[in-house]
Image: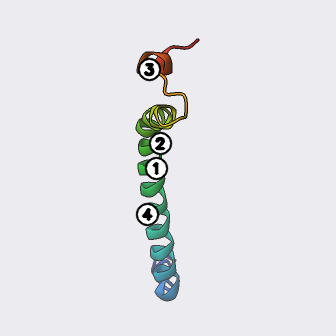
Amino acid sequence: MDSLKGKGKGSKGASSSKLDLLKDWTNWSLKKAKVATHYGFIPLIIVIGMNSDPKPHLFQLLSPV
C-alpha cells in the first residue's frame, strides 16, 4: 500500500503548489498592509487635520478634547 501513495500527484502537485504560492503571497501582503496601516493611520490624521481650513496647532490635534 505504501507504493500507492506517490501515484497520481502529477497534476495535483502543480496546482497545490500554485495554491500555496498564492496563499503565501496573500498572507505576506496582508501582513505588510497591516503594518503600513498601523504606523500610517495617526500621521495621516495629523496631515489631514493640518491641511484643514481653520489651521489648528499640533497640540490641538493631539489632545483628546
Q: Earlier in the sequence, mark 1 or mark 4?
A: 4
The answer to whether the residue labelled 1 contacts the one labelled 2, judged by CB atoms less than 8 Å apart, is yes
Q: Which residue in the structure is indicated by mark 2? A: 37
How many numbered markers are drawn?
A: 4
Q: Position of residue 57 (x, y in %)?
A: 44, 20
Between the C-alphas of marks 2 and 3, the distance is 24 Å
* Badge nearest the viewer, 3 or 1: 3
Identified by mark 3, the residue type is His
Most extreme residue toward the right is 65
**Residue at 53% across / 35% down in the picture?**
52
Q: Which residue in the structure is indicated by mark 4? A: 25
Of 2 and 16, nearer the camera is 16
Kind of element beneath mark 2 = helix
Q: Residues within 10 Å of mark 3 (few under 14, many from 20)?
A: few
Between the C-alphas of marks 1 and 2, the distance is 6 Å
Q: Position of residue 56 (x, y in %)?
A: 49, 23
Q: Position of residue 8 (x, y in %)?
A: 52, 86
Q: Which residue in the structure is indicated by mark 1? A: 33
* Badge nearest the viewer, 1 or 4: 1
Identified by mark 1, the residue type is Ala
Q: Which residue in the structure is indicated by mark 3? A: 57
Kind of element beneath mark 1 = helix
Identified by mark 2, the residue type is Thr
Q: Earlier in the sequence, mark 3 or mark 1?
A: 1
Kind of element beneath mark 4 = helix
Q: Earlier in the sequence, mark 2 or mark 3?
A: 2
Q: Earlier in the sequence, mark 4 or mark 2?
A: 4
